[in-house]
Amino acid sequence: MAEFVSGQSKHDMLTVGNHDDLARQEFAMSLKGFTQNRLLPGLGPVFEGRVAPAFEKEHGQAPSDRHQIRSGMVDDPYFQTYALTNRVAQEMIWSSVQAPLERDLDAVNDRAAQLSSANAARLESAGDFAVPRYVSAIDIHCMPGGYSTQESEADVAAGALYDRGVYLYSMGMMGPDNDGMGRSVCLFVQNQLDGFQPSAILDMGCTVGHSTLPFKELFPDADVTGIDVGGPCIRYAHARAAAKGLDVGFMQRDASQTGFEDESFDLIVSHILLHETSGKAMPEVFKECYRLLKPGGYMIHADLPPFLKMGAFNQFILDNETYYNNEPFWGAMRDLDQEQMAVDAGFAKETVRFDTAPMVMPEDLAPPPEEEQEFVAGEFAPGGGWEVLIARKD
């Protein structure tokens, strides 16, 4: 039976801290839950009841897009309370995890080295790796230091911080192993690609391998590799996989120029990677996927839906991540024509489509009431599904 720490599966790389640290983490996660479950649903009535009428009175028309909605909402005290509380909760989450990690960092790095030696799959990271500026210049998700900051070539601190912190950030909605998204895509592959048996799988932008490992479980004979530009995350991922008893390779490489040989993979996946790239890099990622796939292979990128698939108010709700959670490409990415981008990369138009991978929910979590499901909390849509862009190389 698996051990759990506040709902998260315990493994030999997970750093939580002492009783007081855990109490702080529980409080920060609860505050995040309060903002999403109690404050967020109130934004709709505030908009309809006072912000929209005031905007129409001033401008002679109702707000027509997310930018106009924002211009009316930003000065409303209810919205300000929501946005501030959500940001404070986010910062508290990282702080509550960072403190015990810093106290135990030498032991965490030593433990990672020991575990990695038991993982038969390849580990590759380099101190002189050129991390793209769109990752290195900002602390994405407000995570202190971001994904790539390191003190030494053996440092795994960013990975350890992410593993615990993202569980709290998602309020456990990704499951006890933070792997709900990977499991959702695996289920999609099983259900939609009947009989497909990839022998080589690449997970782009894998961070610490949460979504990578389910592919090794589903296809145990496949060679599964995760890549990411963050060296500490890659090293942590390799050690974590060993702690989970899985031989999965992890390499520090850029998804837009991986360095792998042509036609190296049958299946290439990513999980909430695209909105953390850039307008310049994203088309190159698609081209790289086409180059790397064997004929008959599939590219599947999982994220949230493009803005064209939702109303202006929900666009505004989602776009808060751009303004308050250090996600500069979050909104811009959702305005792009991703299907055309895949075609431009080489995929035949008839093989490219958007679909939905139903969210795999933890057993003890039920979807919210139907009347609340239109609200999307950050990157997580409880009870809904992940939007996947799928394309096949002929």
Image: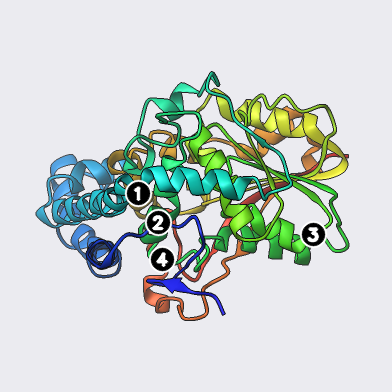
- State the residue position of label 1: 104
Foreground mark, 1 or 4? 1
Foreground mark, 1 or 3? 1
- What residue is at 77 percent from the left and 39 percent from the top? 349
Tell me the CA gap for discs 2 and 3.
28 Å
Tell me the CA gap for discs 3 and 4.
37 Å
Q: Which amino acid does label 1 sit on?
A: Asp
Q: Which amino acid does label 2 sit on?
A: Thr
- The reply to whether discs 2 and 1 touch (Cβ–Cβ < 8 Å) is yes
Tell me the CA gap for discs 4 and 2.
35 Å
Q: What residue type is labelled 3?
A: Pro
Of 209 and 286, nearer the camera is 209
Q: What residue type is labelled 4?
A: Glu
Say which label, 3 or 4, has the lower sequence index: 3
Tell me the CA gap for discs 1 and 4.
42 Å
Foreground mark, 3 or 4? 3
